[in-house]
Image (tube, rainbow, N blue to C red):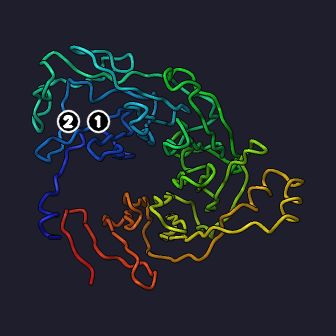
Amino acid sequence: NSSNNYNKVQTLRSLHIDYVHDIAFDHYGRRIATCSGDRTVKVWDLSDDGEWTFRPGTGSEWSAHRGSVCRLSWAHPEFGQLLATCGTDHAVSVWEEREGSGLSLIGGDTSSMLNPTSYSGASTAPPPGMSPTAATRWVSKATLTDARRAVTCLEFAPRHLGLRLATGSADGVVRIYEAIDVMNLNHWAINGSIDVEDVDGAGFAGGALAEATLGVSCLSWCTGKFEPPTLVVGGSSGRVVVYRYSDASRQWGVLLTLPGHSRGVLDVSWSPNVGRGYHLVASCGKDGILRVYRLKRGRYGGAASQTNNKKQSASSLASSSSLELEKHQVLEKGTSEVWRCQWNVTGTVLASSGDGGVVRLWKSDFRNEWKCVSELRGDVSPSVMQ
């Protein structure tokens, strides 16, 4: 079965003319969005025969920022086909897919569209039910420019929290936006902000890309439906911190500080919670370490403690809330940087990738110890670990 699955691997030509900085699947796993240092975003679709296709001329590519595009995130389809992007131009953009005709405007700019004859690797035939002149277009609904430096990461909140968007930037601040009206996506308000990293006085020699390595580098939402709004955030200092929103004070505060990395954190990922009584969080960094944290739900200390909590600050209120570190495990400790980590939809398999050119899959055994069960190398050759 393993070999049959690997036989279905498809190698895609990215069509970007610079490094690809991020790849994101939509909610159903049938669309892929990619962003690059060439300032563009491209959207790929999964056909009925299982092939990933990119159709130039149908609105699948557009120029998204005035600088390098760092990250992107899909919103839950309940809110429509929404895509958020961020870049080194200090901006966050929210895009909505609309039906159009012909070579419609894409974010107000048709110059970024590819010539339909310039790429022979994918069929240029229109999708079923779409006329040859019909197309979709991605329209810029809002541009958020509160960040003082490059915006390095962003992620839409889980559906049960509404249409919220968390962003992190090189100025060391996490900003949480919320759509005032989900039927009018032109207006977004800052729902909260968190000062995560102190970057005052930091040098920025090396330009915008060097700037993007400072401050907040990654963040991830807690998906638990019975938890208040909670984020795990990683930064250039190597700290991994869990923040929680307090309805009483209407502020974000530190809930938990996790064992960090000796150098900068490159990615964090909060596992989907599918009926478990605990949470799993993964982090990876420039020190070559991949780590998994197991967080358990704590308990309040009774009536006296609750009374004292009312007198505490927003930060200490969040700290006394119901999550605590039970244990953590180092999965990988190599000489090369681990760039990304991501969970599957059930939170049972963790994927990691880095400078070594290998994607590793990790699973927990009956002793709750994480083991590497499979590797996929850059030449798309699988190897199953015993």
Task: Give the amino acid type for the residue marked by disc 2 in the picture.
Answer: Phe
Q: Residues within 10 Å of mark 2 (few under 14, many from 20)?
A: many
Q: Tell me the residue that label 2 is attached to.
A: 54
Query: Which residue is depicted at the point 55% across and 54% down?
Result: 222
Q: Is residue 63 depicted above or below 11 in this figure?
A: above
**Quick check: 284 left or right of 103?**
right
User: Where does residue 238 sit, x and y in percent of width and height?
Assistant: 61, 62
Looking at the rendered image, the quarter that the C terminus falls into is bottom left
Query: Which residue is depicted at the point 36% across and 35% down?
Result: 38
Mark 2 in CB contact with mark 1 (< 8 angstroms): yes
Pick the front one: 314 or 383 = 314
User: Where does residue 333 sit, x and y in percent of width and height?
Assistant: 46, 76
User: Where does residue 283 sit, x and y in percent of width and height?
Assistant: 51, 64
User: Where does residue 269 sit, x and y in percent of width and height?
Assistant: 49, 58
Q: Is residue 218 visible?
A: no
Pick the front one: 326 or 170 = 326
Task: Give the amino acid type for the residue marked by disc 1 in the picture.
Answer: Val
